[in-house]
């Protein structure tokens, strides 16, 4: 079987992921993502109303024109999880291909929301649910499998294509979490089986976001314990307290909801993405605290903040958007004094989120924290664990899969250096069986 891999997007940066695997005349596309930082550097950009070519020129979504060089038909579009850097370009690009989007239940619902919000294109594509642990036939000779992984959102998987030449494992995004707060642990048993069955693993495409960080990425249960300790230490504080985290991080949001109630504060989720992600999880019967109060529209948010001020800030925990300091997010507007929530000296702001490693985010987050401190807020920073593997996690995955060839992704060349060193320990060499690619390249695996 002739197999090629097109590294369409996400091979020079953290964001706008898209990879295409051609197996003879069948093509499977993994991810169609957005690089949000390329949008945030512009004022008042509404991606929903923009043409895909304009977003490509902006560097916000993958330039999929390389797909015309692949001699085959797309049979499936497979997002690995619900983060925007993996699904955000689906409304802009997926309608070009006569293929269904296949994903886990939570991811499919988020894709459905993305398509519903699209104002430029008429997107009418089939959405197919497939659960982790299941398989589906791509063609007579290719089977696709979803292997359960753990990440900073629920329902994440790594898809595996079983071909006559061996397995192709698409490893974006994950951490090795054996004690997650929500969902099942990562299925390392299945990864080890795949590495040792039939012809083994022909190619492993890996997320290298944290490949330069030593050690092992801790479990979400570690972040939960740290968050619990932090919030319990503040249970006697009788002033304002605000928390922010990734809206898509349902496990972290669940912990914030639970601990707020434990210290006698009413949690309220505020922000459009908070309402969207948590509302979707609730509709899918994810195990969350009962009677969640959440508001996404500006008027409802303003009314909630006014009620908090009238009834006493000490009685509430607003859980808001803005963990990266996004200019239009609620926490940033609160820091600029654009809402009717007033900070007093000593009020607490809990950032239960790390900074996505990209200059725009780093600058926005710094500015947001400075604005909050100027109003007298005390910052509790980086109560978080990453959703990505560090070096020892990469070592364990290579040990489990024993792939013939490697393609590092989800970083720039500097960010890939730690992964190259880790792979060198297994005997892989750049240019021989480890391919450092760029956006728009095609790698020939077999002829």
Image (cartoon, helix red, strand yellow):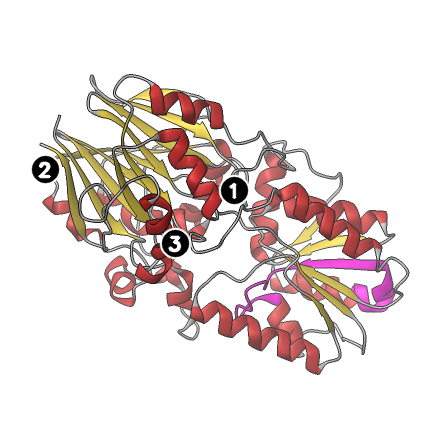
**Residue 133: image location, x then y, percent:** 45, 22
In the image, residue 313 sits, relative to residue 192, either above or below, namely below
Between label 3 and label 1, give the one nearer the viewer. 3
Q: CA distance from mark 3 to mark 1?
A: 20 Å
Question: In the figure, is residue 197 to the left or right of 283?
Answer: left
Q: Residues within 10 Å of mark 2 (few under 14, many from 20)?
A: some
Q: Identify the residue at horizontal 68%, vertical 73% (top origin).
A: 339
**Which region of the structure is painted magenta?**
307-330
Q: Identify the residue at horizontal 81%, vertical 59% (top origin).
A: 316
Q: Which mark is residue 151?
A: 1
Quadrant containing the N terminus in the rendered view:
top left
Q: Earlier in the sequence, mark 3 or mark 1?
A: 1
Q: Identify the residue at horizontal 87%, vertical 57% (top origin).
A: 235
The answer to which of 223 and 346 lies nearer the viewer is 223
Q: Which mark is residue 245?
A: none
Q: Earlier in the sequence, mark 2 or mark 3?
A: 2
The answer to which of 301 and 69 lies nearer the viewer is 69
**Residue 170: image location, x then y, percent:** 34, 37
In the image, residue 435 sits, relative to residue 144, either above or below, namely below
Name the quadrant containing residue 98.
top left
Residue holding disc 3: 418
**Residue 390: image location, x then y, percent:** 48, 48
Q: Which mark is residue 71?
A: 2
> Can residue 119 be seen at all in this image of the molecule?
no
Q: CA distance from mark 1 to mark 2?
A: 34 Å
């Amino acid at each position: 079987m002739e197999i090629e891999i097109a590294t369409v997007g996400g091979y020079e940066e953290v964001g706008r992921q898209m990879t295409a695997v051609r197996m003879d005349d069948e093509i499977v596309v993994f991810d169609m993502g957005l690089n949000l930082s390329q949008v945030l550097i512009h004022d008042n950009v509404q991606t929903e109303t923009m043409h895909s070519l304009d977003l490509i020129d902006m560097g916000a979504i993958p330039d999929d024109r390389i797909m015309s060089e692949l001699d085959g038909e797309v049979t499936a579009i497979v997002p690995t999880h619900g983060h925007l850097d993996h699904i955000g370009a689906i409304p802009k690009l997926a309608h070009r291909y006569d293929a269904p989007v296949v994903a886990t239940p939570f991811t499919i619902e988020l894709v459905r929301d993305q398509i519903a919000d699209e104002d430029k294109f008429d997107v009418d594509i089939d959405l197919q649910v497939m659960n982790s642990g299941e398989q589906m036939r791509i063609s007579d000779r290719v089977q696709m499998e979803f292997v359960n992984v753990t990440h900073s959102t629920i329902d994440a998987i790594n898809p595996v294509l079983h071909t006559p030449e061996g397995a192709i494992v698409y490893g974006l995004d994950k951490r090795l979490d054996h004690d997650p707060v929500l969902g099942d642990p990562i299925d390392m048993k299945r990864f080890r089986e795949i590495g040792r069955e039939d012809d083994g693993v022909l190619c492993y495409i890996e997320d290298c976001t944290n490949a330069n960080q030593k050690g092992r990425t801790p479990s979400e249960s570690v972040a939960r314990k740290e968050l619990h300790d932090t919030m319990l230490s503040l249970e006697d504080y009788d002033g304002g307290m605000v928390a922010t985290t990734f809206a898509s991080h349902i496990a972290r949001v669940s912990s914030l909801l639970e601990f707020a109630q434990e210290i006698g504060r009413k949690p309220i989720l505020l922000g459009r993405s908070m309402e969207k992600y948590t509302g979707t999880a609730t509709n899918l019967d994810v195990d969350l605290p009962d009677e969640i109060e959440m508001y996404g529209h500006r008027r409802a948010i303003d009314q909630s903040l006014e009620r908090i001020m009238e009834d006493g800030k000490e009685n509430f925990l607003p859980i808001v958007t803005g963990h990266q300091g996004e200019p239009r997010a609620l926490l940033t507007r609160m820091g600029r004094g654009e809402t009717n929530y007033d900070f007093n000296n000593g009020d607490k702001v809990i950032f239960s989120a790390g900074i996505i490693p990209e200059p725009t985010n780093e600058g926005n987050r710094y500015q947001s924290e400075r604005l909050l401190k100027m109003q007298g807020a005390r910052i509790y920073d980086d109560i978080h664990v990453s959703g990505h593997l560090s070096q020892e996690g990469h070592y364990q995955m290579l040990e489990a899969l024993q792939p013939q060839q490697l393609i590092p992704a989800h970083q720039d060349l500097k960010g890939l250096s730690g992964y190259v060193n880790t792979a060198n320990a297994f005997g892989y060499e750049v240019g021989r069986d480890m391919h450092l690619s760029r956006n728009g390249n095609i790698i020939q695996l077999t002829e």
